[in-house]
Amino acid sequence: MDPVLADLLKLLTLEQVEDNIFRGESRDIGSPQVYGGQVLGQALRAASKTVDGRGAHSLHAYFLRRGDVEAPIVYEVDRARDGSSFSNSPVVAIQHGRQIFNMTASFQRKESGLEHQATMPDVPGPDGLTDFRDIKKNVLAKLPERVRRFLTIDRPFDVRPVDMPDILSNEKLEPVKHIWMRTKDSVPHDEETNQVLLAYVSDYELLGTATLPHGLRFVREQVQMASLDHALWFHHSCHFDQWLLFSFDSPSASGARGLSRGQVFTQDGILVASTAQEGLMRVRKSS
């Protein structure tokens, strides 16, 4: 298995400290704090370990403080309700004795019922598209060291934007983005692992969609960005070692906050998940 992917699966496994309490490590991916998707994935894993035979159908989370990549994170799960069909599990993430994140995940036993879904966007498939890491060297040379590291660090996913962004441009664009993603190697096909991986990656590139109409690029502008709250709904099972299309849009930005939404489709058009996030988007005035 790809070593970076193997390390991610290990990161998302967690150590059980005692009943309903788990501990996870962190990884530095080049961001100034713990990557929000890591905390989402670990929190969902912790909650999943307290239910039996039910898959998650939704989670709703708030990011409260920056996470420290040098310290472990403790996850405390409250088994608030275990009904005949649904289980509800609030989770608190703690570092240095303080809450940095809280989330509630809801689980449901398998049921059949009415079905309909949104239509998959008509965009090119992943074959022939360029991976996001294949940025030209002359472009990287114009970026700060911390940004070059963030963009070129080895990742466990293949990431192929339908439209490769020009990270040096200030052009104002429509708040829409389409990205194909999959793991770099095969992963277990159990539902829990793939839901945790989807939670992990659901924070990637989402909030940045809200900056597009303003001609802002995080690599050049003095833009402070941070996830505030995050929601994710699971509609169907998926295998993350197969291509998934992440289709993002942003309906609003106001009050130094941006709202972005996402839909996740399999290559054959099945809508497997939906997500939404509001985040801080604060433009710092140059001195």
Image: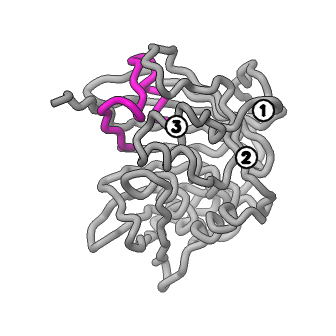
Which residue bears the numbered disc 2?
182
Identify the residue at horizontal 77%, vertical 23% (top origin).
124
| Magenta region, residue range | 206-228
Residue 140 image label: 3
Q: What amino acid does circle 2 point to?
A: Arg
Callout 1: SS: loop
Marks 3, 2: nearer the viewer: 3
Q: Are marks 1 and 3 in contact (CB under 8 Å)?
A: no
Marks 1 and 2 in Cβ contact (< 8 Å): yes
Placement of the C terminus among the 4 image quadrants: top left
Foreground: 219 or 266? Answer: 219
Q: Which residue is more in the foreground, 64 or 181?
A: 181
- Locate residue 58, reporting x and y percent: 56, 48
Classify 10 Å Cα crowding around label 2: few (below 14), some (14-19), many (20 and above).
Answer: many
Q: Is residue 185 magenta?
A: no
Question: Secondary structure beneath disc 2?
Answer: strand
Q: Earlier in the sequence, mark 1 or mark 2?
A: 1
Q: Is residue 207 magenta?
A: yes
What residue is drawn where x is 40% and y is 36%? 278
Is 258 left or right of 79, judged from the image as shown? Answer: left
| Alpha carbons under labels 1 and 2: distance apart | 10 Å
Q: Residue furthest left?
A: 287
The image shows residue 17, relative to residue 190, as above or below, that is below
Nearer to us in this view, 106 or 40: 40
Q: CA distance from mark 3 to mark 2?
A: 24 Å
**Which circle's residue, 1 or 3, is located before the other in the chain?**
1
Q: Residue at position x 57%, y 26% from top?
A: 165
The residue indicated by pointer 1 is 126
Q: Which mark is residue 152?
A: none
Q: How is the image coloured?
A: one colour
Q: CA distance from mark 1 to mark 3?
A: 24 Å
